[in-house]
Image (cartoon, helix red, strand yellow):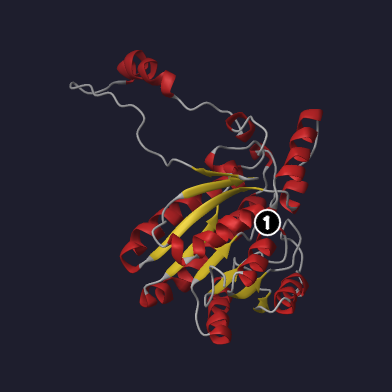
Amino acid sequence: MGVLDGKVVIVTGGGNGIGKECALLAGREGASVLVNDLGGGLKGDDAGSAGPAETVAQEIRAAGGKAVSNSDSVSDYDAVVAMVEQAKREFGGLHAIINPAGILRDGMFHKMAPEDWKAVIDVHLHGAFNVCRASVEHFREQQNGSYVLFTSTSGLIGNIGQANYAAAKLGVMGLSRVVAMEGQSKNVRSNIIAPFAWTRMIESIPVKDEASQKRVERIRKNMRADQVAQFAIALCAEGAMDVTGQVFSVRGNEIFLFNQPRPVRGLARLEGWTPESILEHYLPATRANFTDLSATTGVFPWEPV
């Protein structure tokens, strides 16, 4: 018996990294799995291949599970609609979508090509919209459904050289929040995970100094994709039906619940504000409450457990 017995789950980006571990674990936990992966390179700029998704599907079937593969892109709405229909046709339903599919095209913002901005937004933000929109009516009709979308500390906290990725991943937070709010009455849940894990995305980060080398080595040794998968699968289970609209992070054996933007400090001026009074009173009064520009390593300075 597994926590997903009788469930049907789509896992995007399921040919590698976190997606692969989510697909394999979903199969072990009793789900019928549609494994989706474009089979392209990390930058999403090649033709792709059906091989990675089918290899994972075969592994699930070899272990006694049920799985089929799909090699379409999550950035293509019509293809995602067909993907949803494929899962329903093959397995008789659909109960959850886990969506870690992604690409990277890093670069300093002042040098970023418009096509690199658009490509990352298309896969991460438009892709998240596509998988949700293509399935949400089905979830609402059956009054049961779970989305596990993926954000990043690059968006939640910030990371130099990833303006496109950060914008897309912070957009996913807003999308997930509203999907959860609108779906609450129909038991349609949506949560997001910011993962720390050694994947080909992390492997692609340039190592320019000793500090970067140590950080990347720490990720490789102590933060694995299968650890993230445990939490993603749990969010799809019946025992998590009251969990929705939340932001989580998984870092090795640590699981964090993130806060979400709320007012920190406010001041009122009955006679109204002017630029001068803002400069003289409001900004000095609130400056101590500003959020600093630390990157993820400044927020998580300790070694992973």
Image quadrant where residue 213 sits? top right
Return the x and y of residue 87 as percentages of the image width and height: 56, 80
* Mark 1 closeness class: few <14, some 14–19, many ≥20 residues within 10 Å: many
In the rendered picture of this protein, how many numbered marks are placed on residues? 1
Residue in front for this viewpoint, 14 or 220: 220
Establish if 19 lies above or below 154: below
Establish if 193 lies above or below 265: below
Residue in front for this viewpoint, 294 or 91: 91
In terms of secondary structure, where does tag 1 sit? Answer: helix
Q: Indicate the amino acid at tag 1.
A: Asp
Residue occupying the point 48% across, 28% down = 291
Q: Is residue 238 left or right of residue 104?
A: left
Residue occupying the point 50% across, 81% down = 93
| Residue at the extreme top of the image, as rendered | 280
Return the x and y of residue 245 as percentages of the image width and height: 41, 53
Return the x and y of residue 155 as percentages of the image width and height: 55, 43
- Using the rendered image of the protein, determine whether residue 168 is visible from the camera's viewpoint: no
Residue occupying the point 44% across, 69% down = 145
Which residue matches tag 1?
A: 226
Establish if 151 lies above or below 268: below
Residue in front for this viewpoint, 120 or 2: 2
- Using the rendered image of the protein, determine whether residue 299 is visible from the camera's viewpoint: yes
Q: Is residue 135 left or right of residue 102?
A: left
Residue occupying the point 36% across, 64% down = 183
Q: Is residue 260 left or right of residue 195?
A: left
Looking at the figure, which quarter contains the N terminus? bottom right
Return the x and y of residue 118 as percentages of the image width and height: 61, 55
Looking at the figure, which quarter contains the C terminus? top right
